[in-house]
Amino acid sequence: MQRFIHSMVGAGAVALAFLSSGAQAQSKEPIPIGVIANLTGMDVKTSTDMVRGIQIAADAVNKDGGVDGQPIKLIIEDAQYKTQEALNAATKLYDVDKVPAVIMFGGSSIELAVAPIAKQKGKIIVNTSSSSAKLGDFPGTVYSVLPLDDIVGKALGEWTAAQGVKSAAFVVPNNTFGTGLMDAAATAFEAKGGKIVAKIAYSEGQPDYRADIQQLVSSKPDAIMTTGYGDDSRTIFKDARTLGLKQVWYAGYPSILTVENEAWMNGHLMGVDNGGLSGDVAKKVGADYAAKFGKEEPLPHVFYGYDALMLIARAAAAPGGFSATTMAKSIDGYQGATGAIKWDVRGQRIDPPIDVISYKDGKFVTTGQQ
Amino acid sequence: MLQILLNSIVYASEIAVIAVGISLAYSVVRFANFAHIQYAVLGGYFTYAARGLGLGFPVATAISAVLTGLVAIIVERLVFHPLRGLRPEAKMIASWGVALAFRSGVAAVFGGAARVFDVETDTYLLGDAVITSLDLAVVATTIAAMVVLQLLLYRTRIGTGLRALADNRDLAATRGIPPDRLTALMWFLAGAFAALGGTLFALETRLQPDMDLQILLPVFAAVTIGGLSSIAGAVAGACILSLAQNIAIGVDFGAVLSSRSWFLPSQFRDTIAVAAMVLVLCFRPRQLRSGGVR
């Protein structure tokens, strides 16, 4: 497995944070925290931003003297968006590096493969990006800082119907994330009287999706409901544009889609997304991000990564040290970059703030709350 | 059906340019060079980098083709030439190692994230079918490249020499044809065509270090269908494969049998390529052993 040495800038900044920590923090053994992300291959940008959010949080914790004097030490592994690489990374982190917890960027299918290993070893996964409802099957092991698909999918289906859409075709990645959100959204949409005319689940990593988009065209929907991420979403949009699609796209998590052509997509992409990113903590994290990584617009994953590390640090600082019990209680009174977090008994986020966002003039803007 | 045909022509154009390089190399050095696919990826990145310097697409692509051709020559001198006495299987495995090294190198230099050429396209309607200006440019470029290659091979002394070398290396040498120099030229041509094909493929899709995994199977399936050492066969193989793939994933089989729409999921595109290769290997094994540039 390829050990990924993340960016020199990031590493330098973390080292600087260690150096600038209090003398007490440096005198104690560091607490190793694992990070598994897709730093090469597919979905690199979102993973990179999650890692950056974690680094910002680690810097903040270490700057304040660490966890009872122990600095946080991040050990970052590259899963390359491959299940086997993620399994190798998890095994190394848990068995060799002895980390008590891993912050993980999926997708869902990869995270669902790693979860049984963590459960068997009595370790913790803090989920920052995967949203399959099946992640709720690992109580005491998987804690999610973002809501799962059943919640966001339901919100998408109901909100799309409320916009007056009568018929819709789905185009989603053929994985647990895509089909899970599609099923939840379709159920909610049909419950409100909408009609689903096509469900297209595309294979990730294809060079083009013309055939999939042509199926979509032939179903003649009023609108398209979608989710996805990164490079595949850009290719989907590109093929849709070149094949002359004019419909509006209603998306679950539109902010993680990659817009291919600003002018074509202007006003034609909207949907529901994780909210709560406009609070004071998020603004502070955004400012730290700009200072550390430049003026590039941070993705929401920055804030989820930040909250994940902060919750682990709170659990580690609790009486009795880090455990599933202290992890479950770490959200008590926590106001994070993604707002207040409430977990159900399984450790999955409920009652999350959900924003309605639209793509206008080259950027996503929040137009309301769901 | 017209849309399926258009899609097939565009996709065949992308992979045919890459495939002819493999056939050209195989006909002269008699092993399947897996690194060739990575030359295509490298060529795409060279073009991207040249575009980043503000150069126009034709100039950027030409520079990319020259650079990649030189890289192919260097790899031959450093890796394949020292191994020339070994069996083709050994050289094939070595070429896989070269490919992996290139993939890592590209990722290290350009990063793991995908990159996209910034191109504006116009869309044209042909009945119900759609084709873009980029599609037309890709097909036209491929046709032009094939004409140039054909002229080079059959209307020049260099081409005659290359064909002689492919038919019988020893005999060609006794007739005064410089085998090493022409072999280097062959590698240059193969690398340049790979760069052109990689650029066309990336224009239609995207650039990423593991793009070779998307190219490998269809390209080798195309040259297998057409015969490893046949340039015309590689083009024909690309057309046949592309048509089969696009029919398989583009036809509404559900509508044919019932009122319910059903398409073969697009991930079976690679399965079509594998099936085509298996069929050819089962029924036309002699084709693969024949030599000479045809």
Image (cartoon, coloured by chain):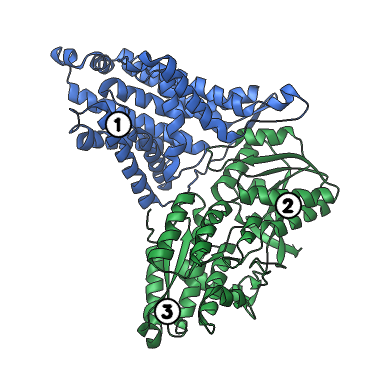
Chain colours: A green, B blue
* Amino acid type at mark 1: Met
Are circles 1 and 2 on residues that touch, CB within 8 Å?
no
Q: Please provide percent x and percent y for residue A259.
A: 60, 50
Q: Please provide percent x and percent y for residue A104.
A: 52, 62
Residue farthest front in this picture? A120
Q: Which quarter of the figure has residue B40?
A: top left
- How many numbered dots are placed on residues in this image? 3
Alpha carbons under labels 2 and 3: distance apart = 42 Å
Label 2: how many Cα within 10 Å (few below 14, some 14–19, many 20+): many
The chain that hosts pointer 1 is B
Check disc 1 and report its element: helix, strand or loop. Answer: helix
What residue is rendered at 40% in x and 77% in y? A30
Q: Is residue A67 left or right of residue A357?
A: left
The label number, if any, that marks residue B206 in the structure image: none
Please, is residue A84 above or below residue A317 in the view?
above
Q: Nearer the viewer, residue A321 or A333?
A: A321
What residue is rendered at 17% in x and 27% in y? B85
Dots 1 and 3 on the same chain: no
The chain that hosts pointer 3 is A
Alpha carbons under labels 1 and 3: distance apart = 50 Å
Check disc 3 and report its element: helix, strand or loop. Answer: loop
**Which residue is label 1 attached to?**
B92
* Amino acid type at mark 2: Ala
Q: Which quarter of the figure has residue A73?
A: bottom left
Dots 1 and 2 on the same chain: no
The label number, if any, that marks residue A71 in the structure image: 3
Alpha carbons under labels 1 and 2: distance apart = 49 Å
**Which residue is label 2 attached to?**
A184
What residue is rendered at 35% in x and 33% in y? B36
Q: Is residue A259 left or right of residue A35?
A: right
Dots 2 and 3 on the same chain: yes
User: From this viewpoint, is residue A268 visible?
Assistant: no
